[in-house]
Image: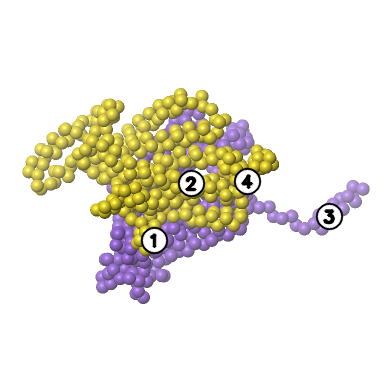
Chain colours: A purple, B yellow
Amino acid sequence: MTLSTQVIAKTNLSKSPAPPKSKSPLRLSIERFFRNPLAVAGLVILLAIIFVTVFPQIFTHYSPSTPDIMNTDSPPSAMHPLGTDSSGYDYLARDLYGGRVDLTVAFAAAFMTMFLGVIYGGISGFFGGWVDTLMMRFVDIMLNFPFISLILVLEAILNTSSQWMLVLVVGITSWPGAARLMRGVFLQMREQDYVVGAQTIGASKWRIIFRHMLPNSLSFLIVLVSFSVASYVGLDAALSFLGLGVPISVPSWGGILNSTTDYISLKTEPYAWMPPATLIVLTILSVNFIGDGLRDAFDPQSKA
Amino acid sequence: MATYIVRRILGLIPTLFVITVIVFLMMHAMPGNAFQSLVFNPRLKNSGELYNRLVKENGLNQSLVVQYIDWMKNVLQGNLGNSFSLNLPVSQLIATYLPNTLILAVTAEVIILAISIPIGVFQANRVNGSFDMISSFISVFLYSIPGFVFALMLIFIFSFTLNWLPSSGTVTAGASWSGSFFDRLQHLILPALALALPSMAYYTRLTRGNTLQVIVADFVRTARAKGLRGRKVLFRHVLRNAIIPIITQFGFDLGGLFGGAVILEQIFTWPGMGELSISATINRDYPLILGTTLLFAVTVLLGNVIADILLAIADPRIRYN
């Protein structure tokens, strides 16, 4: 009898189709992300923008820093598809090369705020108690800090003139929000079973933070970075627009807007300011769609 | 409640203290001071002497600690000092520039709340319907446009192409109707819209999300079951419960709108606090920097307190002890 049951079990096994390969949560999230049409569209647009700013040589043979002095203030023509400015710089070349500064600053600053936020918020949330109270008090103060004056003062002190200074300025002024978010995440995680379990088997604090809690906060971090990139593209452009960003000789979208939106040009040369404005909006829009898609992909319940 | 409000306001003092100390240290870390340009003025004969006298008169040669304590003493007596660059009392300058910023921020807030809350509620009422889909897409789109790009577009469309509204200033200079209510309103529309639109999209999303959470609650079903009209259920029962997180966010943003106005004030040449604080920093006008910072900080902190108080009004279950 035991033999027969064994045989039946065996035949059953051989008849049933091969069990589906189990998928990791990350794999499932990625699949969910690619099923979201808006998110995929955002990804495609963002990749296209990154492509044209990394390889602008394919689309224009003008350099953003050598003026065509025979054709200054030219409207769009076959030679200069978007016209030239009063010094003869080709607008198309400046728009394409300009994206490098904006995207580099936005991504680098987003990673910097994430880094600062994880360390500060992580320590605060993990240790809790008076450490947490004190550290969050400081975050509250920094969150209430008048933002533009802080940037003005920082730029005067650092004497900013490069994109990395801009990254530093944006990072220093924007980390408190990220820190507050990560502190919430860590506070919540600290009470979860796997952390308590790791504590009971005697894992050290640093091991718990780096091997257990940090990988589990990865989904929050990715979403945080994507939304930060979106807001920093706007912030960086706004700073350059105010003349507080990279020097005007270095092309950047905000800088182009700054020089093309005086009272006369805004009215008469829409071909000069509309392309960089469109690029800024398209970049932010695509990153926002990606961020929305990532959030829904990592946390399917949040969609309700 | 009254004791709670008093305690919250008293609790702001340490925060304000720390903010002013940081600003004080940072502004002194900036290179140069307000009077150094005099030294290089070729028209002044004894510029060095004048410079030394001004530095001494304004106490800039004293140690930072003494300077800060002096400033603090004056502030506690209600005296924010005199501006170095404009030669006027800081309080008088703020009194001139603050109303413009206030008008701008308040108008923007009214636009935000009056439009985004009803839209969000209607979206949630027919979730995934055509209105929801279209307006959600538009609000993500609006949310992605930075305020200053919006401002440029608005100026281009409404001032230059359609010629409907003025693009700069608060009044029409030199016209007989200059300064009338209608004139001011015309100048206010574009900057207020540019300030409001990006936040409007955000508030619409927030309202929609919160309404969705409340709309499935039992008490809503009860209200509908006893025969209340749909609109009444929506605005009297659902909204009152969904509005709480919106109020909190609104309080936090009050100060943010103030700060966000800085960039727009530059574009619309709106003579407000933004212009004042930027010129103060560029001119190393220490008393004016401290005065404007203090004002910004007070606004943000008061916004937070107001958020908490409104929260208690909206949700009677919240009791502060």
Q: Chain of mark 3?
A: A
Say few, some or many: other residues with alpha carbon within 10 Å of mark 4 (under 14 / 14 to 19 / 20 or more): few
- Residue kind at label 1, given as amino acid type: Ile
Q: Are marks 3 and 4 in contact (CB under 8 Å)?
A: no
Q: Are marks 1 and 4 in contact (CB under 8 Å)?
A: no
Image point (30%, 55%), residue name: A247
The disc at residue B114 is 2
Mark before the other along the chain sequence, 2 or 4: 2
- Residue kind at label 3, given as amino acid type: Asn
Mark before the other along the chain sequence, 1 or 4: 1
- Residue kind at label 2, given as amino acid type: Ala
Residue at mark 3? A12
Residue B186 picture location, percent across and down: 36, 52
Residue at mark 4? B230
Say few, some or many: other residues with alpha carbon within 10 Å of mark 1 (under 14 / 14 to 19 / 20 or more): some
Element type where label 2 sits in the image: helix
Label 1 in the same subunit as label 4: yes
Residue at mark 1? B157
Q: Nearer the viewer, mark 2 or mark 3?
A: 2
Report how far apart the C-alphas of labels 2 and 4 lie in the structure. 20 Å
Report how far apart the C-alphas of labels 2 and 1 lie in the structure. 24 Å
The answer to whether residue A207 is seen in the rendering is no
Question: Extreme bottom residue here?
Answer: A78
Say few, some or many: other residues with alpha carbon within 10 Å of mark 2 (under 14 / 14 to 19 / 20 or more): few
